[in-house]
Image (cartoon, rainbow, N blue to C red):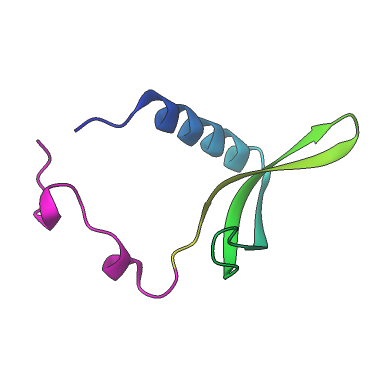
Amino acid sequence: MSIPDHACSNFQTLLRAAADGNLALMECADSATGQTRYVICAVGRDDGAYVFTPFGHLADGNPYEAYTPPNGGDGIAD
C-alpha cells in the first residue's frame, strides 16, 4: 500500500513548517464529540493575521495501542 500524494504533500508542508519554527500545539475541541484534542498546526500569516492550519491531533493514552501498522500489525508492507 502506498501513501497517497495528498498525504505526502501535507507531510512535506509540515516538515517545512517545523524547519522554519512555524508549528504550534493548540488545545481544540473535537467537532464531532466535543472532547479536548491537542492539535499540531502550521502557523502562517495572511495580511498580517496569524493563520493556523491543523494537521492532526496527538494520540490520547498509549499511541502503540491506538494504531497498528498495515497488514494487521506484522510490520511487513505489501
**Secondary structure of the magenta portion, mostly?**
loop
Q: Is residue 16 above or below residue 57?
A: above
From the top left corner, tell me how far across and down residue 68 is, in percent.
22, 57
Residue drawn at point x = 42 percent, y = 33 percent: 7
Image quarter (top left, top right, bottom left or bottom right) of the N terminus: top left
Asked if the stretch drawn in magenta spans residue 7, the answer is no
Q: Is residue 61 left or right of residue 13?
A: left
Query: At 60% across and 68% down in the image, what residue appears?
Result: 34
Furthest-front residue in view? 32
Q: Where is 28 relative to 49, above or below? A: below
Q: Is 51 or 18 nearer to us in this picture? A: 51
Q: In the rendering, at what x and y percent does residue 41 appear? A: 63, 48
Judge whether 56 appears above or below 36 on screen.
above
Quadrant housing residue 33 = bottom right
Is residue 72 highlighted in magenta? yes
Q: Which residues are magenta?
A: 60-78
* The quarter of the displayed image where residue 76 is located: top left
Residue 42 at x, y percent in the picture: 64, 42
The outermost residue toward the top is: 5
